Amino acid sequence: MNKNKIILSCIYLIFAIFMMSISPFGEAPYTGKELYLNNIGTLFLLGLMVLDIFKNVLSKMGFGGLFLFSVFHSVGSTWLYSFVPYNDWFISLLGIDIHAYFEFTRNHYDRFVHFSFGLLLFAATKDLIMYRYKFNLKQALLVTFLSIQVFSMIYELFEWGIAVSLSGDMAESYNGQQGDMWDAHKDMGLAMIGSMISWYVLSLKMKKKL
């Protein structure tokens, strides 16, 4: 077993439990049902880490990306994404008011996580595809890019299912649309941009090895 993967998995387990146990700051309408819904992903991501400890399929970059994305997800789950006080953190730590500088009218943490989905999970997805289908790296990068877009679309469809099956207030707080009718399209677009960046970086690494 890879000791580094075990250590990172344990760190994430402790971090996730801590984030689920604290009372969120700000005005997040947090209830028990929303807690469970928002942390389905937490359990799934932790399960992937534990599984890879035994299978050892993911590279350092792949597992590290999975770990970082999981941390960002847990932070978002604690504040229902729409209420993550990242702007307050930047003001307190760096004296920078991001919302005022860029004239933001909404909380953009969910956008950041969708971008991170494409950026950080690209390498892990590539590792899984190469392990399962024995593609060469060039083929795997293309299939990975397409897979990220499919996963992103499936998640947006899942959110749509939540929206039509839950009460209006609960669906809105879970989905984090914040009144934006193009929210799903923008989220998928950001995931695509993130995956394109990772594709480019991994392609450069491939060229350097040749």
Image: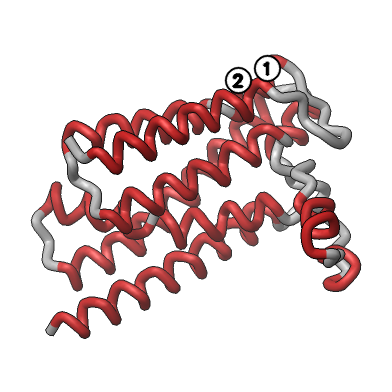
Is disc 2 placed on a helix, strand or loop?
A: helix
Q: Quadrant of residue 74?
A: top right
Percent from the top left, x then y, of residue 132?
Answer: 14, 47
Looking at the picture, does residue 120 appear above or below residue 201? above
Residue 33, label in figure? 1
Percent from the top left, x then y, of residue 79?
Answer: 73, 36
Q: Residue at x 90, y 67 (%)?
A: 100
Figure disc tally: 2
Looking at the picture, does residue 115 appear above or below residue 27? below
Please state which amino acid type lies under the numbered disc 1: Lys
Left-right relation of 38 to 136:
right
Q: Quadrant location of the C terminus? A: bottom left
Q: Quadrant of residue 73?
A: top right
Residue 131, label in figure? none
Q: Residue at x 17, y 35 (%)?
A: 1
Q: Crowdedness of circle 2 by 10 Å Cα count: few (<14), some, many (20+)?
A: few
Percent from the top left, x then y, of residue 82?
Answer: 76, 43
Q: Crowdedness of circle 1 by 10 Å Cα count: few (<14), some, many (20+)?
A: few
Q: Residue furthest top?
A: 32
CB atoms of marks 1 and 2 within 8 Å = yes
Looking at the picture, does residue 59 appear above or below residue 137? above
Left-right relation of 60 to 65:
left
Q: Residue furthest left?
A: 134
Is residue 180 among what the camera can see?
no
Is disc 1 placed on a helix, strand or loop?
A: helix
Q: Residue at x 63, y 29 (%)?
A: 19
Q: Quadrant of residue 170?
A: top right
Please state which amino acid type lies under the numbered disc 2: Tyr
Q: Which residue is mark 2?
A: 36
Choose between 66 and 173: the one closer to the eye: 66
